[in-house]
Image: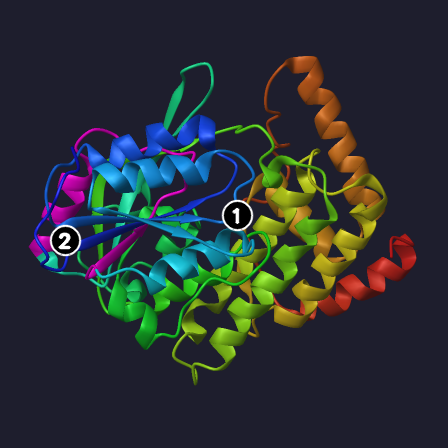
């Protein structure tokens, strides 16, 4: 029998983009619909999925009126499918849930209760990563915030920009997306050009210190874990992010140092992952990273991370790809021998501030290093 709900507008719309996930889709939808309230709707977008996912969506929509099945006529990718879901969303708040992930029991109720408490522009939730072997790794926000009271404005806790970029951990007032003209762009790493502008645009950010999202790690075929030149998309996403900063009339300039550091760290993570950037393209990826470092280094500098991460930042500043490749090779060899992460040498400075003067010095060093 089909479950019918009242015609009043729901408070929360969960948008689920769907592509090639028939093995996980039922588990995802069941975890959302375990909440039986009528103030919820689910907009599930079939992005021309090649498997039976579309039929699964139709079956759920046929038995629960809270579910809207949207079938796209051509594949739009994750960002495009999310945007299509927004066009069909009628809730005051929207929550993006990827179709291979799940919500823990009680998550929807906890989110709705917290939204009712403060009515924020954005609600940030804790999440956990779960693995095929059953392991769970919680990713709490509390260590970032410390004793900072919430709700807050990002200027009170700019370190929130260091949170996982995923849109799935940020429940958002629907109207804010229109006011800030925020939508997802095509390409990989689309959350980079979405989540940071979202937090900067929000007048109030609330935080729920409860795991309300479970991210499935190592889904077979996941593009972000596959060797592909598409990983170069990340440069376009950060271009879009900094274009937003440039067009904000100085309102977001205070966040430049933090976002610059995040950008370089993100590039280094992608390049350091052995199963992402193809070998012949690694030097070109590093070169693009150097270009962005020099073009976007804040005039006031930024706080360089400590340890081995800081050393990598220094090598980027110097355009020293050969030294970076050697460091990475040594690091990976030591990991294989020890069976775990390698502790950075104690002699590397803990933290310092890099400035445009350092870039000029790095350019001179690079010519001697022959690392272009």
Identity of the residue drawn at 49% across and 49% down: 47
Whether residue 221 appears in this view of the structure is yes
Q: Which residue extends farthest bottom?
A: 249
What element does badge 1 sit on? loop
What element does badge 2 sit on? helix
Whether residue 300 appears in this view of the structure is no
Q: Is residue 328 placed above or below 204 in the rendered structure?
A: above
Quadrant into which the N terminus falls: top left
Q: Residues within 10 Å of mark 2 (few under 14, many from 20)?
A: many
Q: Which residue is mark 2?
A: 115
Residue 106: which disc? none
Q: Position of residue 64 (x, y in %)?
A: 20, 40
Identity of the residue drawn at 49% across and 56% down: 79
Residue in the foreground of this view, choosing between 329 and 97 = 97
What range of the chain is rendered magenta? 91-117
Residue in the foreground of this view, choosing between 212 and 355 = 212
Q: Is residue 25 placed above or below 195 in the rendered structure?
A: above
Residue in the foreground of this view, choosing between 159 and 177 = 177
Residue in the foreground of this view, choosing between 303 and 44 = 44
Identity of the residue drawn at 74% across and 48% down: 229
79 inside magenta stretch: no
Which of the two marks, 2 or 1, is nearer to us in this view? 1
Q: Quadrant of residue 254?
A: bottom left
Q: Position of residue 68 (x, y in %)?
A: 29, 50
Q: Position of residue 299 (x, y in %)?
A: 57, 75
Q: Position of residue 115 (x, y in %)?
A: 14, 53
Q: Which residue is mark 1?
A: 48
Identity of the residue drawn at 23% across and 63% down: 121
Quadrant into which the C terminus falls: bottom right
Question: Marks 2/1: CA distance?
Answer: 33 Å
């Amino acid at each position: 029998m089909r479950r019918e709900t009242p015609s009043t507008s729901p408070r929360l719309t969960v948008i689920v983009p769907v592509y090639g996930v028939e093995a996980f889709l039922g588990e995802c939808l069941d975890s959302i619909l375990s909440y039986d309230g009528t103030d919820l709707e689910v907009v599930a977008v079939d992005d021309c999925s090649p498997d039976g996912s579309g039929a699964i969506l139709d079956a759920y929509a046929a038995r629960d009126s809270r579910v809207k099945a949207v079938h796209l006529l051509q594949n739009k990718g994750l960002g495009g499918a999310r945007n299509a879901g927004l066009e069909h969303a009628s809730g005051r708040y929207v929550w993006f849930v990827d179709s291979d992930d799940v919500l823990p029991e009680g998550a929807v109720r906890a989110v709705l209760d917290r939204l009712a408490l403060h009515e924020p522009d954005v609600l940030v939730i804790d999440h956990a990563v779960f693995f095929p072997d059953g392991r769970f790794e919680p990713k709490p926000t509390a260590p970032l915030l410390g004793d900072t009271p919430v709700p807050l404005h990002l200027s009170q806790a700019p370190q929130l920009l260091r949170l996982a970029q995923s849109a799935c951990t940020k429940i958002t007032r629907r109207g804010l997306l229109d006011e800030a003209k925020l939508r997802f762009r095509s390409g990989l790493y689309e959350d980079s050009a979405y989540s940071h502008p979202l937090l900067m645009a929000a007048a109030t950010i609330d935080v729920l210190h409860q795991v309300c999202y479970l991210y499935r790690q190592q889904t077979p075929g996941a593009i972000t874990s596959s060797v592909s030149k598409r990983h170069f998309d990340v440069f376009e996403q950060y271009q879009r992010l900094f274009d937003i900063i440039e067009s904000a009339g100085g309102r977001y300039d205070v966040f430049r140092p933090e976002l610059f550091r995040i950008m370089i760290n993100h590039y280094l993570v992608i390049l350091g992952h052995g199963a992402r950037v193809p070998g012949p393209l690694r030097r070109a990826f590093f070169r693009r990273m150097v270009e962005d470092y020099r073009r976007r280094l804040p005039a006031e500098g930024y706080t360089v991370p400590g340890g081995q991460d800081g050393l990598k930042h220094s090598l980027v500043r110097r355009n020293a790809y050969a030294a970076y490749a050697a460091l990475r090779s040594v690091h990976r060899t030591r990991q294989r021998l020890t069976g775990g992460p390698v502790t950075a040498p104690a002699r590397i400075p803990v933290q310092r501030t890099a400035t445009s003067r350092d870039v000029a010095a790095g350019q001179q060093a690079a010519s001697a290093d022959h690392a272009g």
